[in-house]
């Protein structure tokens, strides 16, 4: 009986199986797997630290994986398929740029209106507090990843602590949150371009965005760092123009020298205050993508420093835009600060248009990153990740196992060494099994880009029916954001690393906040439509 095991399998070997007398070889799909293994050969390590528990979907708490009747078992003869672990290739700076592109973006534009809803007393305080709590829960997730470096995505990390049922629930929530976020990016892109370059309608610009999104969704993460760098630069340009325009403009609106009327305390009601908290939370929601970025790092031991650097930079940018935007436009600030820049000529209409163009370009640098966790999770559940075929009786090759997050790669392997290791696992495979395996690999090689293409089309279709940007971001942050950023990481950490007495209080308070924030977002969205 052949067994399909994911890279999460900690077992060194499986029970012996009948082998073919004919000598065969380990099969690696020539169109994709061999090049990946060749590129990764310099940083392979078979060192493990911590408790190598399996991923929830592939085994139970006792580490039983691929047993008779399990979901990962497939029928066949001649060997078992094992997912290939590809060591990361992204540098610290590439990962930092991708992380900044993830957490600095749509939430930034809504920061001024969040401060307007909360007032000067609570607004900046809650902005800083939200950033610190988000960084804390992200570092909790890093501690879980240290327990098992085979964790591939956000759902893997949370599922490690909550088990198979919890992972399924988390997957549904994750898909919902990321769908809303990516759709909001498409809406932001189309709305902004419809203002600064009205040659197409908003819906037509969404179709143009799809044409740009499709090719970038196939690029490796290390290459997406270049577009992420462009997104970070556009963000800095936006912030610079906003501040310069505020200083150079002599009179309100749009002036820092003559600030618009503002409020010290929340003046728009409790519902708007709850919406504002959701807007702030949505700005720091990078947890869904960052596990994928950490897995792709060349030196994962730098993950903590990378996250601290990214959140520090993001915090400075968020505070600058929130304070300056609120001072410049006061109580009349809109849900996207770019709209205010486009409507008011200020010191230089040309500079304001450049800032709005930066806002329009920024979403296009984030959408490919946002689609990556989607596709990775689907690949895992549909068993579409690349695999190699090895005999039932042989140990799992160490090239399928990642090193610990804390370990430094200690084994330097050349292509010749990898080929020699593959040759060591040639006994026991028959030709029919190899051909069957190769057919599956070719099918997976075709299906992976098809899924990426379908996802890009679906988010564009969703953007065609998207409500207002403020309501979407409030629902994203107030409901899904609080659960995904605070509740689930703390709960998973309690199960995987041990409960602390105050974890329960954090979870309870966050659930109340999530329910209240979602209700407030729906209530205010209804009032907006009535107007």
Image (cartoon, helix red, strand yellow):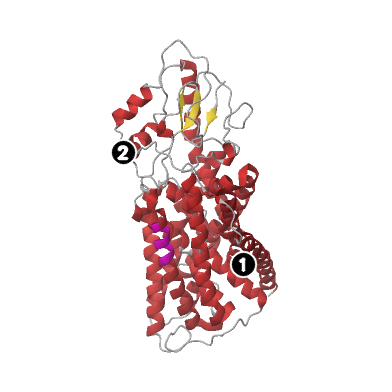
Nearer to the camera, 374 or 162: 162
Cα–Cα span, label 1 and label 2: 48 Å
Q: Report helix, strand or loop for mark 2.
A: helix
| Magenta highlight on residue 306 | yes
Please tell me which residue is depicted at 57% across the width and 60% down the height of the picture.
486
| Magenta highlight on residue 97 | no
| Residue 438 seen in the figure | yes
Most common SS among magenta residues: helix
Nearer to the camera, 494 or 300: 494
Q: Report helix, strand or loop for mark 1.
A: helix
> As drawn, which residue projects farthest toward the front?
501
Q: Which residues are magenta?
A: 305-312
**167 shown above or below 136:** above
**Within 10 Å of the Cα at label 1, are there few (<14), some (14-19), or many (20+) other Cα atoms?**
many
Check disc 1 and report the residue beneath it.
471
**Within 10 Å of the Cα at label 2, are there few (<14), some (14-19), or many (20+) other Cα atoms?**
some
| Residue 190 seen in the figure | no
What x and y, as percent, mark residue 371?
A: 50, 50
């Amino acid at each position: 009986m052949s067994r399909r095991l994911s890279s999460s399998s900690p077992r060194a070997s499986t029970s012996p199986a009948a082998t073919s007398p004919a000598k065969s070889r380990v099969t690696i799909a020539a169109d994709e797997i061999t090049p990946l293994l060749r590129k990764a050969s310099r940083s392979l390590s078979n060192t493990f630290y911590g408790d190598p528990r399996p991923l929830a979907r592939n085994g139970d708490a006792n580490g039983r994986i691929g047993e008779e009747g399990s979901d990962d078992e497939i029928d066949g003869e001649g060997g078992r398929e094992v997912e290939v672990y590809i060591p990361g290739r992204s540098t610290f700076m590439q990962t930092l740029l991708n992380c900044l592109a993830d957490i600095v973006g749509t939430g930034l534009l809504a920061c001024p209106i969040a401060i307007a809803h909360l007032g000067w007393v609570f607004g900046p305080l809650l902005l800083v507090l939200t950033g610190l709590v988000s960084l804390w829960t992200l570092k909790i997730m890093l501690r879980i990843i240290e327990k098992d470096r085979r964790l591939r995505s956000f759902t893997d990390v949370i599922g490690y602590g909550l088990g198979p049922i919890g992972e399924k629930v988390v997957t549904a929530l994750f898909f919902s949150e990321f769908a809303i976020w990516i759709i909001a990016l498409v809406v932001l892109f189309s709305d902004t371009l419809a203002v600064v370059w009205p040659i197409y309608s908003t819906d037509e610009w969404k179709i143009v965005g799809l044409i740009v999104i499709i090719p970038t969704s196939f690029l490796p993460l290390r290459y997406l760092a270049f577009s992420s760098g462009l997104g970070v630069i556009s963000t800095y340009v936006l912030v610079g123009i906003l501040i310069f325009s505020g200083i150079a403009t002599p009179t309100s609106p749009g002036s820092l020298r003559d600030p618009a009327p503002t409020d010290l305390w929340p003046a728009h009601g409790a519902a708007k205050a709850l919406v504002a908290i959701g807007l702030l939370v949505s700005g720091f929601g990078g947890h869904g993508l960052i596990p994928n970025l950490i897995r792709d790092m060349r030196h994962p031991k730098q993950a903590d420093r990378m996250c601290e650097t990214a959140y520090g930079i993001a915090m400075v940018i968020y505070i600058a835009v929130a304070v300056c935007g609120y001072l410049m436009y006061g109580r009349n600030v809109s849900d996207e600060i770019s709209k205010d820049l486009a409507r008011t000529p200020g010191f230089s209409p040309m500079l304001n248009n450049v800032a709005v163009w930066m806002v329009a370009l920024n979403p296009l640098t984030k959408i490919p990153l946002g689609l990556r966790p989607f596709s990775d999770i689907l690949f895992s559940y549909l068993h579409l990740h690349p695999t190699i075929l090895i005999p039932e009786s042989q140990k799992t090759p160490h090239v399928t196992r990642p090193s610990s997050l804390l370990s430094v790669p200690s084994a330097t392997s050349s292509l010749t060494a990898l080929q020699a290791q593959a040759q060591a696992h040639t006994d026991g495979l028959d030709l029919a099994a190899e051909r069957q395996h190769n057919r599956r690999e070719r099918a997976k090689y075709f299906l992976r880009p098809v899924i990426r293409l379908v996802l890009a089309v679906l988010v564009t279709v969703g953007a065609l029916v998207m409500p207002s940007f403020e309501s979407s971001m409030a629902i994203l942050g107030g409901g899904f954001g609080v659960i995904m950023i605070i509740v689930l990481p703390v709960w998973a950490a309690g199960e995987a690393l041990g409960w602390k007495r105050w974890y329960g209080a954090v979870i309870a308070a966050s659930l109340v906040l999530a329910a209240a924030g979602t209700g407030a977002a729906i209530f205010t969205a209804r009032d907006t439509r009535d107007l």
